[in-house]
Image (cartoon, grey):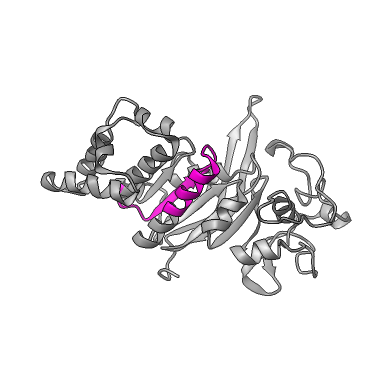
Amino acid sequence: MGSPTPVLSVRGLTVSFASAQRERILAVDGVSLQLHAGESVGLVGESGSGKTTVARAIAGLLTPDSGKIELDGTSLTRRSRSDRRAIQLVFQDPFASLNPRRRIRGVLRELLHVHGLASDPEIEARCVELMSLVGLPAAALDRRPAAFSGGQRQRIAIARAIAVEPRLIVADEPVSALDVSVGATILALFDRLRSELDLGLLLISHNLAAVAAICDRVAVMYLGRVVEEGPRAAVFDDPRHPYTRALLDAAPRLRPEPSEGPRIRDEAPPAGARPSGCAFHDRCPRAEEICRRESPELRAVDGQPQRAAACHFSNEPHTGGRAR
């Protein structure tokens, strides 16, 4: 799918923050991802797994400690205006990201003018077209954000993102604040625009049902690291990391009959208290002595290069169970 060169390539991304005690807390530890034009990838995990930090680093909102982020094969170490335009972030709360005093027409017109994407005679027609693309009437251009529902505001946020003709949209929990039915329509909108505009879409979510609805591939994060990745159907039908299996068991729409295996224990520790060895071993029902001693590498599952898991037992039959 897409061109041979990925739209987005992330290699060895590491991000840390200073704690109140001025110690460095490792939030993201060596994450690598790839995404092609027209492809959608879901980045999932519990709160505190580091997925939003990855999204913000990709979007240029924070500077990583190390690693490479490339757009169409070009490093984003120093981002030009066109680089910033090419990666657009859609936030969880669209109301907070929209200026409450400005009418939608003014927001869109300014974007188009500043980036030279339409001449003055063309700007109005382009604004109307953007409203149409996200399923809103032209009359919406004359209103301010407070006049819209949550779902409509998210449509406006999406219109603002696609107005600058990006190559990649990073959507950070875009439907978590919406009703289920409204969220489903927003996910369908993302999916349609990804296809029609040949965009890359990185969906950051703890909602596995949302990821299952529109993503081609999935990467699962735990305590700052990717612990499993691969095509959505393969990962969801045959998870090879116990943490992935636990997430699927907790998603009733994906697994109506939870697996009969033992459940994971407690909650994830904070990033600054990552256990030695496999970071998941103190919660894992499958853990053995090797898990306490050695951190497993992210490696191919059953010799399939498109699938990988960071578990010492990822190639054993039925390690992950099966999501129904």
Locate residue 18: give its quadrant: top right
Residue 231 visible somewhere in the drawing: no
Residue 100, magenta (yes or no): no
Residue at the image point whose x is 45% and y is 48% from the top: 186
Q: Magenta residues, as a range?
A: 163-189
Residue at the image point whose x is 58% and y is 35% from the top: 17
Across and down, in percent, residue 49 comes to: 64, 43
Residue at the image point whose x is 40% and y is 58% from the top: 192
Across and down, in percent, residue 206 comes to: 61, 46
Locate residue 176: give its quadrant: top right
Residue 167, magenta (yes or no): yes
Across and down, in percent, residue 148 comes to: 37, 33
Residue 115 position (above or below residue 93): below
Left/right placement of residue 161 relative to residue 298 reads: left
Nearer to us in this view, 42 or 211: 211
Nearer to us in this view, 92 or 295: 92
Residue 219 visible somewhere in the drawing: yes
